[in-house]
Image: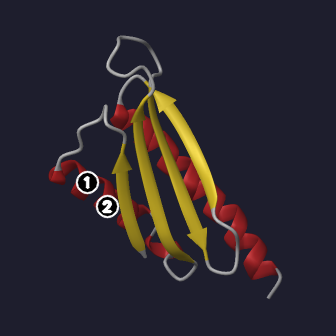
Amino acid sequence: MTIQVNSDKNIEVSESFISKITTSLNDSLSHFAEFVTRLEVFLADENSGKQGSNDKRCTIEVRIKGLNPEAVTATADNIDVAFKQASDKVIQLLRTRTDKMKSHS
């Protein structure tokens, strides 16, 4: 499972944060590894550094073998919370899709 992390120009992402994201996704999605080929994480600051609530966005695009890519998005006051919420949504999405795949085989 390949994991790519991208950010807009308003979010500086350190190597340690990328490692944290990658490790978290690998750990939480390990039981879906046979179904997932690629994950792309997009981090953005919607207010470009201005103060505001729910202005950090995390979108995770998941590519499941044999299906079209799907994306989930979460927004929060900070990027860590947005990432956690988006990764929880990915887990739910994968449960739904893989359960359907298993029931059709």
Residue drawn at x 56%, y 55% as measured from the top left: 90
**Label 1 SS:** helix
Going by the numbered disc 1, the residue's amino acid type is: Ile
Distance (Cα) linking label 1 and label 2:
6 Å
Q: Horizontal and vertical percent for residue 69? A: 64, 65
Percent x, y for residue 27? 36, 65
- Determine crowd level at label 1: few under 14, some 14-19, many 20+ residues with C-alpha closer than 10 A: some
38 to 4, vertically: above or below: below
Q: Residue furthest bottom?
A: 105
Identify the residue under disc 2: 22
Residue type at numbered disc 2: Thr
Task: Left or right? Give the position of 80 relative to 19.
Answer: right
Residue at 23% in and 58% down: 19
* Left or right of residue 26: residue 88: right
Quadrant where the image shows the C terminus: bottom right
What residue is rendered at 70% in x and 74% in y? 67
- The residue that appears at 69% across and 69% down in the rendered structure is 68
Helix, strand or loop under label 2: helix
Is disc 1 in contact with disc 2, using a CB cutoff of under 8 Å?
Answer: yes
The residue that label 1 is drawn on is 18
Q: Nearer the viewer, residue 29 or 70?
A: 70
* Residue 31 drawn above or below residue 92: below
User: Observer-nearest residue: 55 or 20?
Assistant: 55
Q: Position of residue 81 (x, y in %)?
A: 40, 34
Q: In the picture shown, does residue 99 fall above or below 43? A: below
